[in-house]
Amino acid sequence: MSNWSAALVGNPNTGKTSLFNALTRSYEYVGNWTGVTVEKKVGQLRAHGGELIDLPGIYSLQPLSKDEGVAVQYLIEEQPHAILNVIDASQLERNLYLTIQLLEYEAPMLIAMNMNDVAEGRGMKIQEHKLAELLHVSVIRVNARRNQGIPNLLSSLSTEGRSMQDSTSRFKLDYGKEIEQAITELVRLLPAVQHLAPRWLALQYLENNKVVQQWLQEHAPAHALAMMNIRNNTEKKLQAAGKALHLAQHIRAVRMAFIRELQDVSVSRAQRTSATLTDRIDAVVTNRWLGIPIFMLVMYLMFKLTFEWIGSPVSDLLDSFFGGALTDWLNDGLAWAGASEFTRALLVDGILAGVGGVLVFVPQILILFLFISFVEDSGYMARVTLVMDRLMESVGLNGKAFIPFIIGFGCNVPGIMAARSMEQPRERLVTSLLVPFMSCSARLPVYALFAGVFFSSNQALIVLSLYALGIVLTLILAKLFTKMLMKDEQSIFVVELPPYRMPQWRTLFRSTWEKGKGFVRKAGTLILGGSVLIWLLSYMGPGGFNVDMDHSFLAKLGGILAPVLAPLGFGTWQAGASLVTGFLAKEIVVSTMNIIYHAPDMSLLSLEIGKAFTPVSAYTFCVFVLLYVPCLATVGVLRKETNSWKWTLFSIGYALVIAYTVALIVRLIGLSLGYV
């Protein structure tokens, strides 16, 4: 069956996305921390056809956050033919809670037991055949990172799902007479939906699952009052019998009792004689006094590698190619073909200067992404959220908010989307509004250019200061926004601390490429188109074509902003034009300067930049680029995620005010210290 599908479901940090990649020969973003998958992803299975849908990591079918709601909504609306439940063997009790809820869904199901090496390291010995016997479902040991157990899974995930059908029977827990009577009464009122188990719907309704309740209100509105009465009366019966205060509490207690019985039968534990490597490392990196300084040291070393030790020499080689050999070849080829001066200027002064001026920074960006991927996949990034939790709580958020901020260092767009993992709507809104202050990779070419010209011996420190400034301002604004918007909301913080692992190089390189690919693709599309437009604006003016650039349309556009920018120390039309075009994408700031200053390579551009700016105005310009309006793509995703033009326009307006104010303060401080 070509339309056969299986849903991949599990807790966060169980290796679910790694397993998805192994089963589908496809690659999705993999990180060793919570919040990586924020929407469903679809891939074709390597064998037997059919689709595998990777759903967001969830702890139960009671959605607390927007991304958890995606998983429940999928199970209701699209009803997969089968479920592949991946569990972490080292956290069996917590993982099996979701497993029971999925078994009650009554779809053919298979369990992939991952992280077995971690469980064994903790002295746990799991007899999967006993688990399978008690749950009435096949359990297969896998190691997603090492591709172990994948053939067995693929053979079970056939296009017809026959092998899974044969090994799956209906799972049923007895919840006591009060609950069972309520289920029977509710089933009579529920709409008949193919492949959707009425008992599962009834249980989810009794558990107060908001997604299920909303679905039932839409599909069975005539019985809404009757169903509510059944739930309320059942809860009163439980309270009168002294069994529980709430329905959901009683249902959870029954499931947890069954899970403990499962563990007693199928799991044996050896006594741990010493602390694990993870415990010893965590004693240092999560220390309340050392945690943040260690994180700042990691960031500093990352920028040292990116901008001084490795990145700059490689970028210089690429720059010499674009500005030397490639420019000469293109000029010679155009001369041989008899191309017009307009064509030569467009290709060499426009496209090559604009796109090439950004591509020379690709090595630095890839090195930064490689380092970030290493930190993520090793397990350290999850510790960063824990370390930052106390600080984030002081400004009204929690450590989980730091995940979208960290993702925002790569690109603000997925950073805002990752805010879906925040449980509270207002907390999610505040986080989304603040992510654009995280210094994304698109700003790196600007920093690298100015730091290389004016602060060559302290590039890492200068770039780190810009990142730190973005974080500090984010914390200050978070305090303000949470006081205004989150007066009545209680913040929730749940984060996984996976064991430390040495990342696989293949995974690191693929992850780095996936992150960097977007930057390269943007250079070939948006930056290419922007470079052509910018060059045309610099080539044309009120007097016609091939005008002096100071009298071009681009100069007039930048000249409008020049007086406004003058107090900041860069009141020129060139700076104004670069900032305007930077709204499309921050990398285009460098492209625009390359075209304006007719710089075929970075050495000539550096010379022109050195004449146009001073150290203070250069740093102030970088501060302004860090903080001023989000790029066009970020504005688009803000509109989509907030579903409000009011908040989208607010994010643009307040960012401009903050950028101008902070840049002015930075310049005044620099001048007062005697710098120029």
Image: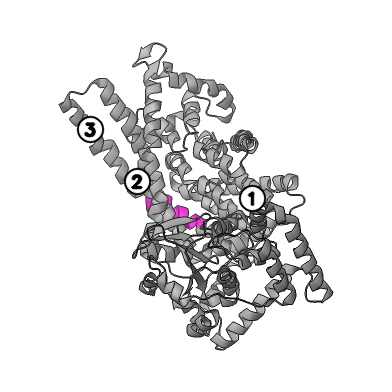
Disc assigned to residue 553: none
Specify whether residue 307 is painted magenta.
Answer: yes
Helix, strand or loop for the magenta stretch, by majority: helix
Of 396 and 190, the residue lying toward us: 190
Q: Which residue is mark 3?
A: 330
Circle 2 sits in a helix, a strand or a loop, which is it?
A: helix
The picture places residue 224, in percent across and down from the top left corner, at 72, 55
Of 525 and 473, the residue lying toward us? 525
Q: The disc labelled 3 sits on which kind of residue?
A: Leu
Which portion, as a residue range, is magenta? 299-312
Q: Residue 92, percent across and down?
A: 56, 77
Q: Position of residue 364 (x, y in %)?
A: 40, 49
Q: 10 Å neighbourhood of mark 1: few (<14), some, or many (≥20)?
A: many
Q: Earlier in the sequence, mark 1 or mark 3?
A: 3
| CB-based contact (under 8 Å), mark 1 and mark 3 | no
Of the pair 341 and 88, the residue shown nearer to us: 88
Tag 2: amino acid: Ser
Task: Tell whether 494 sits left or right of 52.
Answer: right
Residue where numbered disc 1 is placed: 428
Q: How far apart, in angstroms, are the residues tagged by discs 2 and 1?
A: 38 Å
Relative side of 134 to 448, left or right: right
Give the position of the N terminus as an image quadrant: bottom left
Disc 3 on helix, strand or loop? helix
Residue 482 visible to an observer of this rendering: yes
Residue found 36% across the figure and 34% down from its top: 528
Image-quadrant location for residue 496: bottom right
* Residue that label 2 marks: 315
